[in-house]
Image (cartoon, grey):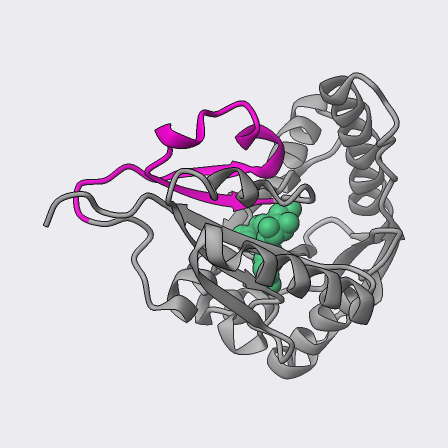
Amino acid sequence: MKTIHLIGIGPGNPDQVTLEAVKTMNTVDVFFMLEKAGRGKDELLAVRREILERHVSHPHRVVTAPSPRRNREDPHYAGGVVAWRDERIDVIGRLIDTELEDGQTGAFLVWGDPSLYDGMIESLVLLKARDTLDFEFTVIPGITSVQALTARHRIGLNRIAETITITTGRLLEDVAAESVTNAVVMLDSRAAYHRFAETGHDVYWGAYLGTPDERLVAGPVAEVAPVIDAEIEAGRARHGWIMDTYIVRKPRTEP
Ligand SMILES: C[S@@+](CC[C@H](N)C(=O)[O-])C[C@H]1O[C@@H](n2cnc3c(N)ncnc32)[C@H](O)[C@@H]1O
């Protein structure tokens, strides 16, 4: 039997790796790293390697493999995601099969927490269901980019007795802006916060959270949307990529 740990490593700051993650990393024989093509991949891999250097003394190997590319031209979004996910499961299965001996422990370092907009848990569940490999897996939680965002802005995720929704820029387009009380928006490449300029919402925005390049902006959307636009443009120009998350929040109407 082989063991695989999915270890949440936080949103990019080696200080935000939990003690449980560190303990678990020090039992691992092989760390698998799936390299995504495209901008930012070197920096994201470098953070993972820095975390290993800082926190791991147990002898281990690092095995990298290219992660399949998603076909973003596919007009059928869900179908495209499923095909890409299946290809990724093939790659993960091959790594576990060929790079890990029976009785050994492998791990994938997952950005933030494995439960939040990450496909690794589902991939391992589906891989197990194929019944072609003898392995067990565990999930070690990590600090999410959402927690890093709220901590930096010194805000709660919601105010007392309010709802909180976590969504993406794409999904937010189908929601009436007035109906949103608190929404965390991730994976937004379309500046969906602009929709809240007319409704009086506030926004709490953060990019490269937890890294030395962290950027924060907060205020009424109507006032700060151009500031966020400029930050995103500057971040992209400087790094070639951006990772940003924000909360849009309806101002309180009663005391
Ligand atoms: C594929 S999701 C992964 C989320 C991750 N599992 C987590 O727990 O934060 C990637 C999105 O997370 C957000 N994100 C991840 N790391 C971030 C960071 N350091 N700063 C700002 N946003 C981040 C961005 O919205 C990005 O588009």
Please indicate, yes or no, whether residue 9 appears anywhere in the rendered image: no
The correct choice, above or below, for 155 with respect to 47 in the image is above
Q: Does 179 sit left or right of 227 as displayed?
A: left
126 or 251, which lies in front? 251
Identify the image quadrant of residue 93: top right
Q: Residue furthest left?
A: 255
Expressed as whole percent of the image width and height from the top left, the position of residue 147 reads 42, 59
Q: Does 253 sit left or right of 119 as displayed?
A: left
Q: Is residue 176 magenta?
A: yes
Q: Is residue 72 magenta?
A: no
Total marks placed: 0
68 or 186, which lies in front? 186
Q: Does 213 sit left or right of 88 as displayed?
A: left
Magenta-drawn segment: 160-186
The residue under the point 84% across, 66% down is 42
Please indicate, yes or no, whether residue 73 appears anywhere in the rendered image: yes
191 or 198, which lies in front? 198
The residue under the point 22% across, 47% down is 252
The residue under the point 77% across, 56% down is 32
The correct choice, above or below, for 100 with respect to 51 in the image is above
Which image quarter is the N terminus in? top right
Expressed as whole percent of the image width and height from the top left, the position of residue 150 reads 39, 61
Expressed as whole percent of the image width and height from the top left, the position of residue 34 reads 80, 52
